[in-house]
């Protein structure tokens, strides 16, 4: 009897102990695996019933790049060793440090080119920037400032260019201007009335002109600027408008062709085909190309001009190209030209280029030459244009300026933002100069673009000829670069 009671009691005691152990909150289960490998990974298995928020906050945070896994009711935290975590943090710190140093370098570089003592950016203070009321001029207020009038397309089809240039000009005046200089914007996106322009010059007494963007507006402004002996820095690419008080910051068709054709001649190409739109632009680039090629009488050239009607009529387009290229089904390789220049809008180029390949013009064997229009993502990724060449203006200090642009405006800067900033810097310097005369601009260099001005209106631009590689990547044809170094 005793034995049976004892046996029964033992069973009760064991069951009680098991129940107590199962309910005990203080006995959490901890499993740590630490393998002896070069790069160690630790796994911590924690029972979620025993995990307190305090421990989670203090011991394990998202900042250490910890990976979370949920298996049944357990959470596994995986993390790399401290050495790797420290390396990642150091890398981020180095990136921010480099950015600060780059911004500081930009500020110092621009200071060297300015006589203004106000070098702090303050985008909230817009007292020295205004948008002009197109019909009402306040003469009494205007005489208190040294006015720089800016003619830009702030509305209309070119407004994206005008907006970017305006942002860059705002940067220049807010960063380096003073309370005596005022930028006044005039929107050229609408009809520009000559009477308004006349009143603008008579009432605001401008000291410097920046813009406009198009040739049509420049024609209206030039006589007034000439009358008052005022310098104009225009973004128009019509070099025919250049004279001793007008400097063109645009990349003219003549300059583009000059660089890419000269590069082809340097490389020994001698048989040129020219395919261009049947309009004034096509005639300009064709004439410039022929002038360059004809210097050597041994060179050969032939031109094909295509109207919009011919471009849209596929049958006629095929026939014209086939005849021009002397295509023969019996010959697998094209032999008439060793270089072909394609000029025109993006749509023109993308219509013509694939047909050249169809008629056995392999861009890896026949050099395809283009204008600045080739610097477009669709064109750079067109297979029939791989290995083709085109010119670009490569700003001298673009890498430094882009940090400043990103820090203030965000997004990417481009040639127009760079040229706009330089125009503002040069305008500020000119207005601050006590002896204001056009000779002041002789041999002036833009701090970002590297553009070099002379006193007869010519602007030397840092140009590079680029080659399109696979997947739209670009490489520089080094012997054809003109970087103003």
Image: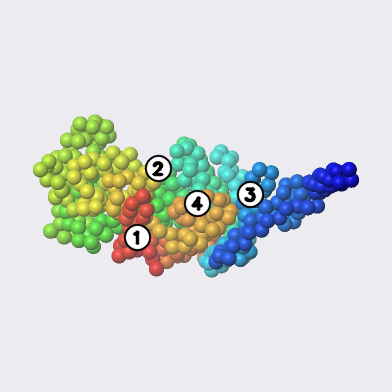
- Image mark count: 4
The residue to which callout 2 is attached is 216
At x 37%, y 44%, the residue is 378
Question: Mark 1 or mark 3, which is nearer the start of the sequence?
Answer: 3
Q: Is residue 37 above or below residue 55?
A: below
Q: Which residue sits furthest right? A: 2
Residues at discs 3 and 1 in contact (Cβ within 8 Å): no
Please report contact status of discs 4 and 3: CB closer than 8 Å, yes or no: no
Using the image, tell me which numbered label, if any, was put on residue 412: 4
Q: Please name which of the two marks, 3 or 1, marks the residue nearer to the observer.
A: 3
Alpha-carbon span between mark 4 and mark 1 = 21 Å
SS at badge 4: loop
Q: Residues within 10 Å of mark 1 (few under 14, many from 20)?
A: some
> Viewed as shown, does residue 169 lie left or right of 220?
right
Structural distance between the alpha carbons of marks 3 and 1:
47 Å
Is residue 427 shown to the viewer in this render? no
Query: Where does label 1 land, which residue?
Result: 476
Tell me the SS state at disc 3: strand
SS class of the residue under badge 1? strand
């Amino acid at each position: 009897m005793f034995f049976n009671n004892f046996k029964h009691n033992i069973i009760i005691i064991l069951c009680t102990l098991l129940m107590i152990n199962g309910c005990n909150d203080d006995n959490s289960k901890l499993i740590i695996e630490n393998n002896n490998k070069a790069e160690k990974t630790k796994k911590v298995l924690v029972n979620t019933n025993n995990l307190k928020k305090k421990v989670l906050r203090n011991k394990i945070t998202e900042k250490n790049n910890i990976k979370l896994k949920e298996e049944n009711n357990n959470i596994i935290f995986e993390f790399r060793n401290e050495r790797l975590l420290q390396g990642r943090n150091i890398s981020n710190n180095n990136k921010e440090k480099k950015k600060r140093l780059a911004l500081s370098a930009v500020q110092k570089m621009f200071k060297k080119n300015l006589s203004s003592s106000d070098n702090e950016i303050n985008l909230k203070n817009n007292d020295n920037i205004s948008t002009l009321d197109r019909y009402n001029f306040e003469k009494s207020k205007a005489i208190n400032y040294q006015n720089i009038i800016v003619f830009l397309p702030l509305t209309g089809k070119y407004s994206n260019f005008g907006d970017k240039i305006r942002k860059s000009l705002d940067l220049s005046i807010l960063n380096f201007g003073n309370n005596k200089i005022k930028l006044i914007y005039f929107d050229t996106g609408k009809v520009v009335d000559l009477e308004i322009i006349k009143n603008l010059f008579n009432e605001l007494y401008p000291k410097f002109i920046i813009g406009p963007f198009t040739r049509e507006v420049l024609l209206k402004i030039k006589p007034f600027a000439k009358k008052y002996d005022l310098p104009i820095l225009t973004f128009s690419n019509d070099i025919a408008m250049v004279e001793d008080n007008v400097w063109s910051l645009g990349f003219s068709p003549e300059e583009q062709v000059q660089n890419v054709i000269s590069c082809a001649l340097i490389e020994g190409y001698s048989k040129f085909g020219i395919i261009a739109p049947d309009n004034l632009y096509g005639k300009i680039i064709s004439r410039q190309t022929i002038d360059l090629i004809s210097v050597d009488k041994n060179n050969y050239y032939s031109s094909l001009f295509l109207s919009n009607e011919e471009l849209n009529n596929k049958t006629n387009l095929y026939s014209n190209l086939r005849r021009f290229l002397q295509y023969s089904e019996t010959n697998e390789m094209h032999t008439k030209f060793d270089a072909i220049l394609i000029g025109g809008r993006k749509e023109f180029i993308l219509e013509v280029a694939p047909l050249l390949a169809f008629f056995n013009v392999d861009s890896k064997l026949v050099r395809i030459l283009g204008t600045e229009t080739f610097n477009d993502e669709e064109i750079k990724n067109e297979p029939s244009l791989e290995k083709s060449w085109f010119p670009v203006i490569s700003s001298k200090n673009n890498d430094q300026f882009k940090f400043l642009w990103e820090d203030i405006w965000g997004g990417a800067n481009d040639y127009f933002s760079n040229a706009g900033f330089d125009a503002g810097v040069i305008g500020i310097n000119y207005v601050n100069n006590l002896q204001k005369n056009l000779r002041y601009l002789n041999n002036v260099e833009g701090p970002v673009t590297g553009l070099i001005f002379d006193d007869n209106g010519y602007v030397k631009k840092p140009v590079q000829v680029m080659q399109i590689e696979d997947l739209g990547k670009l490489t520089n044809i080094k012997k054809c670069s003109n970087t103003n170094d």
